[in-house]
Amino acid sequence: MSRPLLQLLLVSCLSAASGWLVSPACPTRRAISAAPAACWGVRMDEVAEAGEAAAPVDDFTEELLDALAADEAPLSAMETQPVFVKADNPDETLEPRLAFTNEQSVEAMRQKYRLHASDTGSAQVQIAVLTARIQYMTSHMQKNKKDYASLRGLTAMVVRRRKLLEYLLREDLSEFQRLTSELGIRTNQLTKPKLSGARGRRV
């Protein structure tokens, strides 16, 4: 084989190898590479439209915050008396259940004897709430004398109220007298001296 023929064969092999390694630019690949940018533009337009649609919600939120800042009474704080009616006959009113009226009386006691706006655990509030629940459970036990579970709960509430009254008697006598007179709690067993010693001497 002559030398020029070998050179020509070598050049053709090198050109073929370079064609395998470096592929020519394809218009399809260029379109695919440019697609994310186009999609990004579409997504940004969607985000902008969503922001414009959400603008009324932000305005409503600002109005709500302004109303609360102006000390307007929320719906839960409005003093409205609920009316119970039948589902099939809205014109016929029903009496509320005892559990509902009991909870209302407890909340009324809590609102009346609290020391400040967020008071839920002072001795006065606990005594008033326990008194309302004791009255309800006492009327329940008069009708259901064999309800021993409720009887145990009633006994526990009476013991708890007695301990709170003893604490209030030690700490604030005037508040103790005011609270017991308003709630109608008998204080004979609380004010008399306790028995102590082996022979029960009064101290």
Image: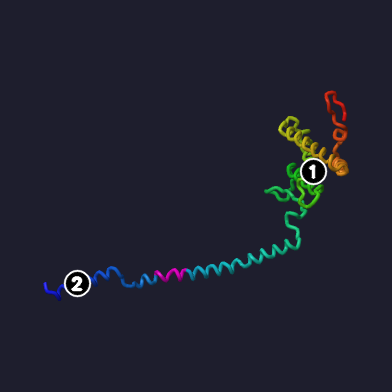
Identity of the residue furthest to the bottom in this view:
4
Q: Nearer the viewer, residue 13 or 190?
A: 13
- Look at the image and say whether residue 78 sits in the magenta stretch: no
Residue shown at the point (64%, 65%) measured from the top left: 58
As helix, strand or loop, the secondary structure at mark 2 comes to: helix
Task: Give the main secondary structure, helix, strand or loop, of the magenta stretch.
Answer: helix
Q: Residues within 10 Å of mark 2 (few under 14, many from 20)?
A: few
Residue shown at the point (70%, 49%) measured from the top left: 89
- Look at the image and say whether residue 36 sits in the magenta stretch: yes
Q: Is residue 187 above or below residue 84?
A: above
Tell me the quadrant of the picture where the C terminus can be found.
Answer: top right
For this view, does 54 lie left or right of residue 150? left
Q: Give percent across and percent down for residue 44.
A: 52, 69
Q: Residues within 10 Å of mark 1 (few under 14, many from 20)?
A: some
Residue carrying label 2: 10
Q: Is residue 103 above or below residue 159?
A: below
Residue carrying label 1: 123
Q: Over which residues does the magenta segment extend?
A: 32-39
**Amino acid marked by disc 2:** Leu
Checking the image for residue 2, the label placed there is: none
